Amino acid sequence: GKAILLPGPTLTGKTTLVSELLRLGATYYSDEYAALDAKGRVHPYARALSVRSGAADPHPERRTAEDLGAGVGRKPLPVGLVAFTHFKPGARWHPRILTPGQGVISLLENAVPARRRPEACLAAFRQVVAAAQVVRGARGEAGEIAQALLARVE
């Protein structure tokens, strides 16, 4: 009943983590963009995932949520967790909880429309951080963190 946002630049391991969450039963909303409304709810943007065999893979394989055995979301969801994380070999997941202000600034750094529509982005992000926990930290393998993220959002 709540969404997990995983903002971050390309090649930080987001798709690997999303794929693992889907294998564990999460419903798919998006891998690349979080479409937020003015209330801070996430809307489905269910495009195929670009799964790479390694960081240097120039031709990622396109896989749908259904390919991974997952369902696709149909209605907007409130955000329950925002996790700014990146893969680091051997890292242990010990996230730091961010303040609402830090959360908004971090979301702005990752928002595509922030330059053209800053007021709308800020309004949505304020709603998100008021309702969700926002954390940051390096992580190891996706299988080790996916359960922890699901437990945090519950």
Image (cartoon, rainbow, N blue to C red):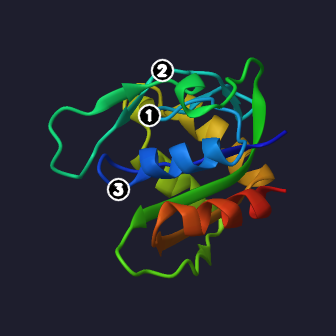
Residue 68 vertical placement versus 73 (above, below):
below
Q: Residue at x 67, y 25 (%)?
A: 37
Mark earlier in primary sequence (2, 3): 3
The numbered mark at residue 47 is 2
Q: CA distance from mark 1 to mark 3?
A: 12 Å
Placement of 130 over or under 125, stated as above or below: below
At label 1, counting other C-alpha atoms closer than 10 Å, the crowd grade (few under 14, some 14-19, many 20 or more) is many
**Lateral position of residue 132 relative to residue 67, left or right:** right
Q: Is residue 16 left or right of residue 126?
A: left
Q: Is residue 31 above or below residue 102?
A: above
Would you say residue 102 is visible in this rendering?
A: no
Observer-nearest residue: 129 or 75? 75
Q: Earlier in the sequence, mark 1 or mark 3?
A: 3
Secondary structure beneath label 3: loop
Q: Quadrant of the N terminus?
A: top right
| Residue 117 x %, y % | 47, 26
- The numbered mark, 2 or 1, whose residue comes first in the sequence reads 1
Mark 2–mark 1 contact, CB under 8 Å?
Answer: yes
Query: Which residue is tagged 3?
Result: 12
Identify the image quadrant of residue 149. bottom right
Looking at numbered disc 2 in the image, what kind of residue is underneath it? Arg
Which residue bears the numbered disc 1? Answer: 32
In terms of depth relative to the viewer, which is nearer, 31 or 22?
A: 22
Taking the image as shown, residue 13 lies to the left or right of residue 55, namely right
Residue 68 appears in the figure:
yes
Question: Considering depth in this image, is 101 or 18 the residue closer to the camera?
Answer: 18
Q: Which mark is residue 98?
A: none
- Going 48% across and 20% down the picture, which residue do you hit? 47
Q: Position of residue 122 (x, y in %)?
A: 58, 40
Q: Dot 1: what SS?
A: loop
